[in-house]
Amino acid sequence: MWRLAEFWNDRIQKDMEVCHGLINPILKDALDMKRSIKEGELPTKHAYTEGEGLLEDTLLGHLVNCTEDAAVIRDEIMNILIAGRDTTASTLTFLVYMLSQHPDVLKRLRAEVLSTVGSSRGPTYDDVREMKYMRAVINETLRLYPSIPFNIRTSTEAVVWPGVNGGPPIYIPPNTRIPFSIILMHRRKDLWGPDADIFDPNRFIDERLKYLTSNPFIFLPFSAGPRICLGQQFAYNEMSFFLVRLLQTFSSITLAEDLQTRPSDRAEGTGRNAQEKVIIQHHVSLYVDGGLWVRMGEAGNSNDV
């Protein structure tokens, strides 16, 4: 129905012109260089741009070597940039939020970082693989706060699903839109145990991992199957790098509750909503309303900065 709402004008055209203004000159250079290569002016099969440097192992280089359709290349680049920005920013926000609420987790995670990488060196891929607790902290954050909390799929053909908890089977007609909530599934006690509302990274290390190993499709921050996120491992490495650098620099993180917007109707009881100290919203991705405000103590300095 959006076409009716934008019948007379495209409301995002002005914003897209800014994005295209950045991408188009870079794309033009790459395409011009590819044409020069095809005409034999340059003795290489790879595209070339910005005056120097081969693009053999970059997304732009791959796309230019596959097609010369500027619109296709530009749209693919925009898709990757947007998909890789908002979701990662969301997860990093909630990672910092959880570290501010669980100083014991922060202390243990920082000890792992310092023992593996040290206080100044940048992490390598091998370092990231060795830090099991860091992966557990990231996974537990993604469990409680998946960056994409809701998703939808459409059946391509008729299928019968097994019933829920032994109930009758469910018939799904073809071409049926099926919305589902990842955030609610990640907090189900029948799937994750009675402590599903509690932030505890150890569940990805100790015996509670049995819930996941017996049914891996209960954990879908990156989706699963043939539609799984192509950038899954890149996202893990990116977030791990951020955490290493953050904890090398800062030794404490506290929520700035005098500045932070708090929920006005916090639920009673012990559920997850009763524990929140920020207002959580979502568009496509999950975010903290008004941003996350924290104070960090610099490593080696007891004063907040």
Image (cartoon, helix red, strand yellow):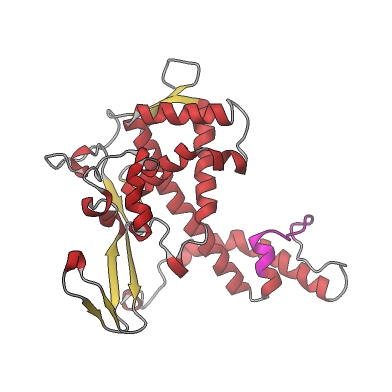
* Identity of the residue drawn at 23% across and 42% down: 195
* Identity of the residue drawn at 20% across and 40% down: 263
Depth check: 10 or 259 in front? 259
Q: Position of residue 194 (x, y in %)?
A: 21, 45
Left or right of 90? Residue 144 is left
Q: Image quarter for residue 159?
A: bottom left
Task: Indicate whether 102 appears above or below 178.
Answer: above
Most extreme residue toward the left is 268
Task: Indicate whether 3 appears above or below 96.
Answer: below
Task: Indicate whether 294 appears above or below 187.
Answer: above
Q: Image quarter for residue 207?
A: top left
Left or right of 31? Residue 264 is left
* Identity of the residue drawn at 66% across and 63% down: 60
Asked whether 59 falls inside the magenta stretch, the response is yes
Depth check: 86 or 74 in front? 86
Q: Position of residue 161 (x, y in %)?
A: 27, 74
Q: Does the magenta stretch mainly form a helix, a strand or a loop? A: loop
Left or right of 7? Residue 245 is right
Query: Which quadrant of the rendered structure holds the C terminus?
Result: top left
Asked whether 300 falls inside the magenta stretch, the response is no
* Identity of the residue drawn at 45% across and 31% down: 109
Q: Position of residue 230 (x, y in %)?
A: 52, 62
**Residue 195 visible, this angle:** yes
Total marks shown come to: 0
Depth check: 186 or 121 in front? 186
Q: Position of residue 285 (x, y in %)?
A: 37, 55
Q: Which residues are magenta?
A: 49-63
**Residue 291 visible, this angle:** no
Query: Which quadrant of the rendered structure holds the N terminus?
Result: bottom left
